[in-house]
Image (tube, grey):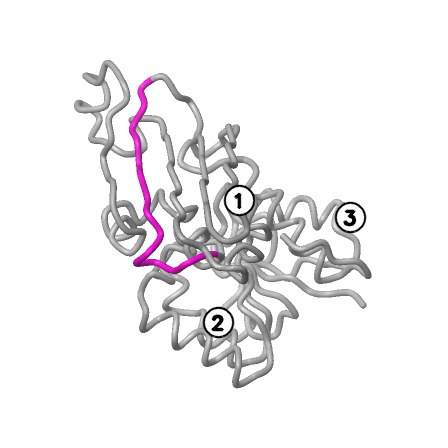
């Protein structure tokens, strides 16, 4: 079965995934086009309106929290699987409830791509056994978190946030989707602790996830490579491709 894939957004991640689909690198998928603010002449594929978006077999949201709020529920109510990258928006309990309700009503799925973090499968398994603590620490280039003058004056790493995931999303909505993904896989937005560190020595994001509970304990560390957009790790596009492969392929390895 070939699945027609449409994108909400046409930024770095959407364009890279679309390029791989168009090149035949993601078997079982074809490119429908983009619902985006960019002029049609600048898009690497057909421009879509909201109605055309709903005719796709799979929709990938890669445009930010507002785009997920605006289009996510309609996509899911149509019965179309939605691959979500703006996971931070799901910290809004009302939006989360509406999206999950729409998916349940139509028998489809809201798919959270692993993005710039890993170990979510292990964390879900650990949650079944019982988790006592989950901490997700993100170290980011200072310029992606601070005002230019403040970032330039920084001489060493500083902690800019330490608290519940439910609060970090409001402070850093454009740069924090990793922590919400960890929260969804584990013990939720209020109980999962997030630490965000601005580090002037970094050129790309680093992530450290620690968990302990009845299963034992684990720590996972990632040093990501930046994409063309310094706020986004290159691995995010690959995680979307992996998700699309899982939808189209005969074997699924949990993400």
Marks 1 and 2 sit apart, C-alpha to C-alpha, by 20 Å
- N-terminal of the pair, mark 2 or mark 3, is 3
Res 63 seen here? no
Name the residue tied to disc 2: 50
Q: Is residue 44 magenta?
A: no
Depth check, front residue: 29 or 137:
137
What is the residue that sits farthest to the top in this orientation? 155
Q: Quadrant of the N terminus?
A: bottom right
Task: Please say if 214 is above or below 140.
Answer: below
For the point 27% across and 48% down, the residue is 168
Q: CA distance from mark 2 to mark 3?
A: 26 Å
The label shown at residue 24 is 3
Q: CA distance from mark 1 to mark 3?
A: 17 Å
Q: Nearer the viewer, mark 2 or mark 3?
A: 3
Residue 189 belongs to the span the image colors magenta: yes
Residue 219 makes an appearance in the image: yes
Residue, disc 1? 13
Q: Which span of residues is magenta-colored?
A: 186-200
């Amino acid at each position: 079965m070939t699945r027609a894939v449409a994108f909400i957004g046409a930024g770095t991640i959407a364009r890279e995934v679309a390029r791989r689909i168009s090149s035949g690198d993601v078997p079982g998928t074809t490119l429908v086009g983009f619902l985006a603010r960019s002029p049609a002449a600048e898009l690497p594929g057909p421009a879509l309106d909201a109605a055309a978006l709903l005719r796709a077999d799979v929709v990938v949201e890669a445009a930010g929290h507002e785009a997920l709020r605006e289009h996510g529920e309609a996509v899911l109510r149509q019965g179309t699987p939605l691959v979500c990258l703006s996971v931070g928006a799901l910290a809004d309990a009302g939006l989360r409830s509406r999206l999950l309700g729409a998916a349940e009503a139509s028998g489809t799925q809201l798919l959270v791509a692993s993005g710039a973090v890993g170990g979510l499968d292990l964390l879900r398994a650990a949650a079944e056994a019982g988790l006592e603590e989950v901490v997700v620490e993100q170290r980011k280039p200072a310029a992606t978190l601070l005002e230019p003058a403040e970032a330039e004056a920084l001489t060493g790493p500083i902690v800019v946030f330490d608290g519940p995931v439910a609060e970090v999303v409001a402070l850093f909505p454009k740069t924090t989707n990793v922590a919400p993904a960890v929260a969804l896989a584990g013990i939720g937005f209020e109980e999962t602790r997030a630490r965000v560190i601005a580090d002037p020595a970094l050129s790309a994001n680093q992530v450290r996830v620690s968990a302990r509970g009845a299963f034992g304990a684990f720590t996972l560390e990632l040093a990501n490579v930046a994409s063309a957009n310094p706020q986004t790790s290159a691995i995010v596009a690959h995680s979307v491709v992996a998700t699309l492969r899982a939808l189209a392929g005969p074997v699924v390895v949990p993400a």
